[in-house]
Image: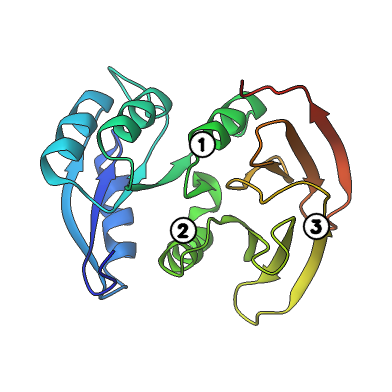
Amino acid sequence: MNVASIRVLVVDDYEAWRRFVCSTCQQFPQLRLVGEASDGLEALQKAQELQPDLIVLDIGLPNLNGIQAAHRIRQDSPRAKILFVSENRSFDVVEEALKIGAGGYVVKSDAGSDLLLALEAVLQGQRPAVMDGYLFVGSTANNNGLYAVNANTGAKLWDFTSGDSVFSSPAIAGGIVYFGSSNNSKVYALDAKTGTPVWTFSAGIYG
């Protein structure tokens, strides 16, 4: 991907929110806004027509929701990164986002501070989840852990090591960080503030 010109598609059914996302994207000279869409079907059409590098995608869309749209976009444009920005905090939705392999997940209520941080992390090749000014990313050193850092200072909040292979994209809901292992056999839930495991689920759930 050419870092000097990353093509961005913004998808949300609320025009004022699209304006906010576009305004945030414009703070990065390497991001070029190529289009907008207001529902899931239009997102599919625009993604196919414009071939964006990054899609900022809502989940609660009319006609076709963001999860369904992302599944189909992945088939047509597998190299496009998807950053979900949604009001939805439910585990089921987080799980689906992990399954799709989202480039990141930001909760709308926190987006005033966190969207900028998430975009910065995506541009650096990370797959971030963001909460309260902290980035949660998979370890690149040992490929079997994850860590949280202060996005402004780089200070480490915590790190967590597992015996599993490299993690898929993290997502946050209700103060819990969820990571799936890359062999599709486990999901980890950690307290976002401390990194303490809340539970681990192992059942080959992504099948």
- Amino acid type, residue under disc 1 in the picture: Glu
Instruction: Return the disc, 1 or 2, that comes first in the chain's sequence.
Output: 1
The residue under the point 66% across, 79% down is 154
Q: Which residue is mark 2?
A: 115
Q: Residues within 10 Å of mark 1 (few under 14, many from 20)?
A: some
The location of residue 202, given as percent across then percent down, is 80, 27
Amino acid type indicated by mark 3: Lys
Residue 56 - label: none
The crowd level at tag 2 (other Cα within 10 Å; few <14, some 14-19, many 20+) is many
| Quadrant housing the C terminus | top right
- SS class of the residue under badge 2? helix
Type of the residue with mark 2: Leu
| Residue 129 at x, y percent in the picture | 59, 53
Residue bearing the label numbered 1: 87
Circles 1, 3 touching at the beta carbon (< 8 Å): no
Residue visible at 21% across and 69% down in the picture? 5
Its colouring scheme is rainbow
Position of 107 relative to 31 (above/below):
above
Q: Quadrant of residue 25?
A: bottom left
SS for callout 1: loop
Mark earlier in primary sequence (1, 3): 1
Badge 3 element: loop
- Pointer 3 residue: 193
Q: Residues within 10 Å of mark 3 (few under 14, many from 20)?
A: some
Task: Measure the C-alpha gap from mark 3 to mark 2.
Answer: 19 Å
Q: Is residue 115 above or below residue 51?
A: below
Point 49% across, 60% down: residue: 118
Q: What distance separates the C-alpha of mark 1 from that of mark 3?
A: 21 Å
Q: Earlier in the sequence, mark 3 or mark 2?
A: 2
Work out which quarter of the rendered image holds the N terminus and state it. Answer: bottom left
Foreground residue among 1 and 115: 1
Label 1 and label 2: CA atoms lie apart by 13 Å
